[in-house]
Amino acid sequence: MDTVERFYDLVWTTDWVDAGLTLREQAVVGMRFGLRDGNRYTLTEVGQDISRVRYGSGPVSPQRVAQIQNKAVRKLLLFTGQERVA
C-alpha cells in the first residue's frame, strides 16, 4: 500500500471528533480530500466555502486553509499513533 492509500485509509477510519478536530478542520479535510461529496476542492474553493459559513468575517485565504489542513492532518496522525505517513 502506498503512502497516499495509507493516508486515505487513516482519514476514512478515524473518528474525527475523538481525534480532536474542530468543525473547521473537519470541513477542510473533508473538502480537500474528497470525503464530503467525492470531489476534491482547491485551497481557494475551500476558503470561499468556509467564508460563506462564517457570515461576513471576511475571506479565508488559501494559505490559511493550508495551515488548517496541516494542523488537522497532524492531529489525525498523532491520534492514530502515526507521526508520519511515509
Image: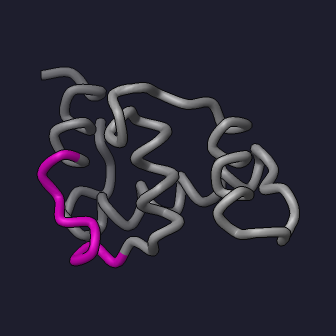
Vertical order, 86 against 47 (above or below) = above
Q: Main secondary structure of the magenta part?
A: loop
For the C terminus, the image quarter is top left
Residue 17: name its quadrant.
bottom left
Is residue 15 in the magenta section? yes
Is residue 16 in the magenta section? yes
Residue 78, how many percent across, how many down? 30, 67
Residue 23, how many percent across, how many down? 45, 70
Give the total of numbered labels: 0
Residue 60: name its quadrant.
bottom right
Q: Judge by depth and name the residue closer to the eye, 76 or 59.
A: 59
**What range of the chain is rendered magenta?**
12-20
| Left or right of residue 84, residue 43 in this image | right
What residue sits 53% from the left and 66% below the top? 24
Vertical order, 81 against 41 (above or below) = below
Residue 55: name its quadrant.
bottom right
